[in-house]
Image (cartoon, rainbow, N blue to C red):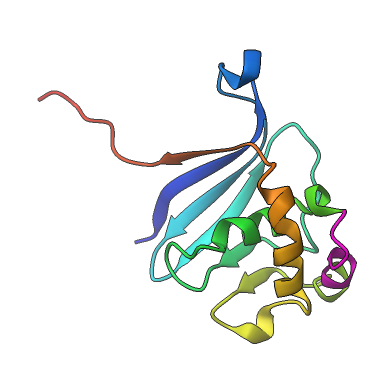
């Protein structure tokens, strides 16, 4: 049975210097676990267009170091608009619905170049993380 194990929240710091948590929330990136791990996006009030029609990211393996940056590029490409390789990746990802990093043929041309160009912009994103664990209950 598949389910979600983690949620990343992308947004701005609310209150003085972010002391009030995340506000506004621009999108969530949910991490699902089943026979393979996947990442998907849920958007909120801010209109954000994903890269092509990408709905799902399948990382190289569980906990892949590049999974979150890859998801941010796919689900929030406008943040990386200054990256020269973005235009090439957009063109080759127009009809793509999923990126499966275990299958190199499913990855758009120049993705690795774009990922490296995107790292400084990724570091500027406000990202919060929540590991989903059951709430302890008194018995």
Residue 48, placed above or below residue 85: above
Residue 8, placed above or below residue 15: below
Q: How many marks?
A: 0
Asked if residue 20 shows in the view, the reply is yes
Q: Residue at x 68, y 50 (%)?
A: 122
Q: Residue furthest top?
A: 16
Q: Residue at x 67, y 53 (%)?
A: 72
Asked if residue 15 shows in the view, the reply is no
Q: Is residue 35 left or right of residue 43?
A: left
Specify the quadrant of the image occupied by residue 11. Answer: top right
From the viewer's side, name the closer residue of 129 and 93. Answer: 129
Task: Quarter of the image for the C terminus: give it.
Answer: top left
Q: Is residue 9 left or right of residue 75?
A: left
Residue 94, placed above or below residue 121: below
Residue 106: x percent and y percent? 67, 80
Residue 126: x percent and y percent? 64, 36
Residue 19: x percent and y percent? 56, 17
Residue 100: x percent and y percent? 59, 75
Q: Residue furthest front?
A: 120
Q: Residue at x 53, y 49 (%)?
A: 30
Task: Quarter of the image for the N terminus: give it.
Answer: bottom left
Point out the stretch of residues depicted in magenta: 82-89
Residue 99, placed above or below residue 27: below
From the viewer's side, name the closer residue of 122 and 70. Answer: 122
Q: Residue furthest bottom?
A: 105
Q: Residue at x 75, y 72 (%)?
A: 113
* Residue 34 is a magenta residue: no
């Amino acid at each position: 049975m598949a389910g979600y194990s983690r949620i990343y929240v992308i947004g701005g710091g609310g209150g003085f210097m972010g002391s009030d948590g995340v506000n506004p929330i621009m999108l969530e990136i949910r991490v699902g676990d089943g026979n393979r791990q996947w990442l998907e996006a849920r958007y909120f009030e801010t209109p954000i267009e994903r890269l092509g029609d990408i709905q799902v990211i399948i990382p190289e393996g569980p906990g892949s170091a590049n999974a979150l940056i890859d998801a941010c590029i796919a689900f929030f490409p406008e943040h990386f608009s200054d990256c020269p390789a973005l235009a090439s990746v957009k063109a080759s990802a127009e009809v793509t619905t999923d990126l499966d990093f275990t299958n190199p043929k499913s990855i758009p041309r120049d993705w690795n170049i774009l990922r490296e160009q995107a790292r400084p912009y990724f570091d500027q994103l406000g990202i919060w993380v929540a590991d989903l664990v059951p709430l302890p209950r008194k018995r």
